[in-house]
């Protein structure tokens, strides 16, 4: 991947990078993430800048007012406990079902109805405007968003069985 200077060449100076020396992250009893930086404690909302290419690097930290508190260059910049807290929060936010097999895929009046085997068991979901609801991440990976905003991914189209591939190839 590009080096850091190339990656942030267009971003204005003044980015504050958060690390174990200048930021403390903690989870509250009721499950909210907080950050203390510059002597100020606030809720923390994490956003991956590059969710598919660099999921553990360049993570924006926003407060409850949607103001950026800083950027985490890499989760590796933190101790094990903090890294675990941050990783769990990112996993929760960016959760998606990993589709292993497409059992049924039916099209009816602009909607498609899916039944799939996933890493979490069998799921059934509905997709509206299927062509626009499928995002190609790479030549081999796609993401699907259903009518409720839930996300489903096929990590490797090549790894799908032939029957599953025949069902989805029309929409790719």
Image: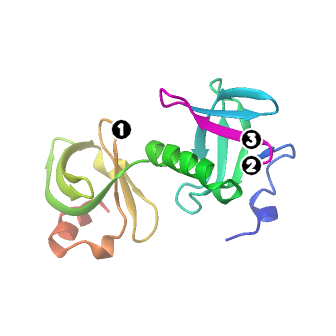
Q: Which mark is residue 23?
A: 3
Furthest residue toward right: 13
Q: Position of residue 26 (x, y in %)?
A: 61, 37
Which residue: 39% across, 71% down?
140
Nearer the N terminus, badge 1 or badge 3?
Answer: 3
Q: Are marks 1 and 2 in contact (CB under 8 Å)?
A: no
Q: Estimate the spatial distance between the alpha carbons at disc 1 and disc 2, rounded to whole Å.
A: 34 Å
Task: Look at discs 1 and 2 and give the one toward the viewer.
Answer: 2
Which residue: 81% across, 29% down?
39
Q: Which residue is mark 2?
A: 20
Q: Secondary structure at mark 1?
A: loop
- Locate residue 78 relative to residue 172 in the image: left or right: right
Q: Which mark is residue 127?
A: none
Q: Which residue is mark 1?
A: 149
Query: What segment carries the magenta color?
Result: 20-32
Q: Secondary structure at mark 3?
A: strand
Which residue: 59% across, 50% down?
81
Compare residues 29 and 12 and report the one nearer the observer. 29
The residue carrying pointer 2 sits among few (fewer than 14), some (14 to 19) or many (20 or more) residues within 10 Å by Cα, namely some
Q: Main secondary structure of the magenta part?
A: loop
The residue carrying pointer 1 sits among few (fewer than 14), some (14 to 19) or many (20 or more) residues within 10 Å by Cα, namely few
Location of residue 128 by image quarter = top left
């Amino acid at each position: 991947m590009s080096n850091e200077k190339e990656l942030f060449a267009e971003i204005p100076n003044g980015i504050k990078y958060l690390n174990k020396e200048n930021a403390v992250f903690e989870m509250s009893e009721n499950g909210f993430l907080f950050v203390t930086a510059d002597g100020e404690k606030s809720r923390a909302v994490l956003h991956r800048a590059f969710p598919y290419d660099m999921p553990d690097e360049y993570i924006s930290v926003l407060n409850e007012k949607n103001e950026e508190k800083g950027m985490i260059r890499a989760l590796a910049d933190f101790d094990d406990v903090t890294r675990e807290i941050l990783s769990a929060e990112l996993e929760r936010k960016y959760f998606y079902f990993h589709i292993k097999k497409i059992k049924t895929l039916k099209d009816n009046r602009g909607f498609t109805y899916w039944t799939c085997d996933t890493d979490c068991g069998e799921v059934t979901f509905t997709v509206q405007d299927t062509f626009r609801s499928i995002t190609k991440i790479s030549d081999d990976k796609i993401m699907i968003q259903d009518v409720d905003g839930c996300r489903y991914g096929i990590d490797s189209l090549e790894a799908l069985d032939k029957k599953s591939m025949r069902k989805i190839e029309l929409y790719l």
